[in-house]
Image (spheres, rainbow, N blue to C red):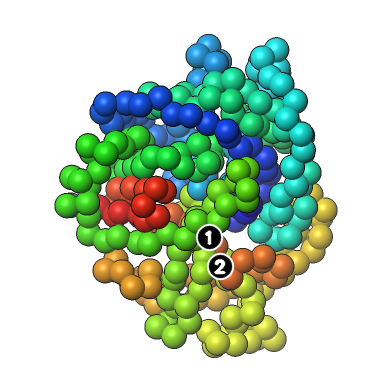
Amino acid sequence: MKTKSKFFFSILFLLCTYHLHLQTLHSETIPAYITPDGYIFIDAAFNDTVRTRLMFDTGAGLSVVSQKLFNLLKPTVKPAGVFTAFRHDGERLDGELFIIPKLTIAGRTVYNVKAAVYPPLDDYGIEGVVSLKEFENTALTIDFKNKTFTIETAESLPAIENTAVAQIPLKLHRFTETSLDIFVDICLNDSVNIEAEFDTGSGYNALLINPYYMKSLGADSSTTPNRPYVTPTEKKRLVDYISSAGSLRFCGTSFPEVLNAGLIFRQGLIYEGLIGSGMFRDRSLTIDIPNSRMLVR
């Protein structure tokens, strides 16, 4: 599993799905409520009657529900064991799992959703988080400019392929049948290649790099500006080193590079890197898990 760049979204853990999707004959589009910082929320319904708004988070690994939402669903759920996950900063998260009969988003239904509850979500006004695990058998599109969320079909994908300006390969990371994360290769300064988790749950501004790469990127921990970073659960004090890269691009793709990209070397980061969705804020992004790629328009 993974993590957030802002502490109040560090609460993500635990919901996976054993799921079957209803077949749809056409793609369906719903509004996407995107905050100025790039956090994505979409409308959903549990068991047809409990309507909610969930944060869409490609870095969550699993989906999560708040205590208030869980209380509404509790009469229908069944216990489903326990799960342990780790945040990007190494914090361990343990939780109990429950099976919720049904989840519907944009006309697509997932059955027997294995979910966990995390009460602190209520403190942040978040009803729940939906992960890529619920979309592993289909493609979806987030149109950041027009603020829409679309479930694609085999019929709608060819038009997207024909108009895409770039195709970014994805590496899938699965933990048995429980969680799903995606990673991309990013090139920094045309000399350092890093495997980074792609995380819409970090919003637009996140680019976290493992301090292992400081030297190769020309940064020195004794002179690089820094600030404290405190983990949300264990309150462990770590250090963020604030720096930049001369250039940032997705390795081996035609997507335009970004110059003077800000980055943070985060002490304790368990990945080589973690990148948010800022490079796509004026674009349409299709995440196609079955074909292990992202299509950019």
Q: Nearer the viewer, residue 210 or 228?
A: 210
Residue 21 coordinates in the image, percent (x, y): 44, 29
Residue 16 coordinates in the image, percent (x, y): 61, 37
Secondary structure under tag 1 reads strand
On screen, residue 250 versus residue 71, left or right, reads left
Numbered label attached to residue 4: none
On screen, residue 70 versus residue 149, left or right, reads right
Residue 24 coordinates in the image, percent (x, y): 32, 26
- Residue 106 seen in render: yes
Residue count near mark 2 (Cα–Cα under 10 Å), binned few <14, some 14–19, many ≥20: many
Q: Which residue is mark 2?
A: 273
| Quadrant of residue 215 within the rendered picture | bottom right
Q: Is residue 70 above or below residue 137?
A: above
Tag 2 or tag 1, which sits nearer the N-term? 1
Q: Are marks 1 and 2 in contact (CB under 8 Å)?
A: yes
| Residue at position x 41%, y 48% in the image | 289
Secondary structure under tag 2 reads strand
Q: Which residue is mark 1?
A: 197
Three-letter amino acid code at the position of disc 1: Glu
Residue 49 coordinates in the image, percent (x, y): 53, 11
Three-letter amino acid code at the position of disc 2: Gly
| Residue at position x 62%, y 72% in the image | 210
